[in-house]
Image (cartoon, helix red, strand yellow):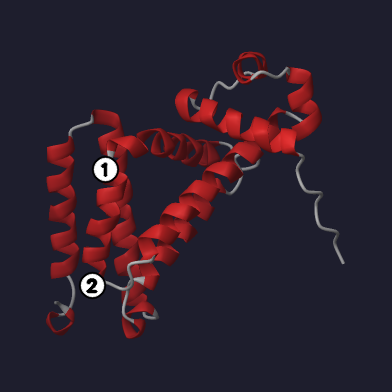
Amino acid sequence: MSEEPPSPSARQVELLEAAYRYALEHGLADLSLRPLAAAIGSSPRVLIYLFGSKDGLVKALLARARVDELAVLGSLGEAGPPADLTTAAEQIWLWLRAPRHRPLLRLWAEAYTRSLIEPDGAWAGFAASTVTDWLALLAARQPQPERDTAEGAAERTAVLAALRGCLLDLLATGDQDRVDAALRYQLRLIENGRPAQDRP
């Protein structure tokens, strides 16, 4: 039987939250312990002691970002199943497009990309985990008979691809109107691809 990992100390939690705020502003790609430590009132030695290594700190920061992501998914799922999956996607997009969420989503995009480039490093598994998390949210918003079919899985994957692609475009360009229109267009294509009896 494996032992539970020790609970983090109050100081470790405090520094992790401060480092997370720093990462939201500055990103993680070029993270250097010295400027990070100076910005959050610590030292590289203390950070190494508390997190084991720079990679250990990055892993802790990615886990912290995932806590925020899962909180978002939970809040988006509280409304209950909408009439159809595309309505759910529109609700999710309203959250994703809000300017106040850009720091978290830029950090998400950075971590997603690094996870693909460095699959065995500190970023390992982040991209796959976030795909699984979002597909689970979308599955929960599908009617049960549709959810468990190959077509249902394909449709929610297409919706996720549309959301992700539009999000990356929006983060890159800030062109809200064009990207909003593109998402609506893609959701119409997905909806029109359903058998006639399944359309709302």
Q: Amino acid at mark 1?
A: Arg
Disc number placed over residue 121 in the picture, else none: none
Q: Examine the rendering and report whether any part of residue 193 can be seen.
A: yes
Q: Does residue 53 lie above or below 38 as drawn? A: below
Query: For this view, does 178 lie left or right of residue 14?
Result: left
| Residue 121 seen in render | no
Identify the image quadrant of residue 28: top right
Image height check: is 90 above or below 78? above
- Name the foreground residue: 33 vs 135: 33
Q: Which residue is mark 1?
A: 97
Percent coordinates x, y for residue 94 in the rendering: 25, 50
Residue 47: percent from the left, percent from the top?
74, 26
User: What residue is drawn where x is 54% and y is 49%?
Assistant: 67
Q: Position of residue 101 (x, y in %)?
A: 36, 39
Residue under label 2:
84
Residue for point 26% across, 68% down: 85
Pick the quarter of the image with the C terminus: bottom left
Whole-number angstrom distance, CA of label 1 to CA of label 2: 20 Å
Image quadrant in which you'd find residue 159: bottom left
Does residue 9 sit above or below 131 in this rendering? above
Q: Secondary structure at mark 2?
A: loop
Q: Amino acid at mark 2?
A: Asp
Residue sitting at 47 percent across and 49 percent down? Answer: 69
**For mark 1, does the 10 Å Cα neighbourhood hold few (<14), some (14 to 19), or many (20 or more) residues?**
some
- Of labels 1 and 2, earlier in sequence is 2
Quadrant containing the N terminus in the rendered view? bottom right
Say what secondary structure mark 1 lies in. loop
**Residue density around tag 2, few if under 14, some if 14–19, many if 20 or more, within 10 Å:** some
Which residue is painted at 18% across and 42% down in the image? 179
Q: Are the two marked residues, 1 and 2, in contact with CB atoms closer than 8 angstroms?
A: no
| Name of the residue lying farthest toward the front | 10
Q: 164 left or right of 55?
A: left
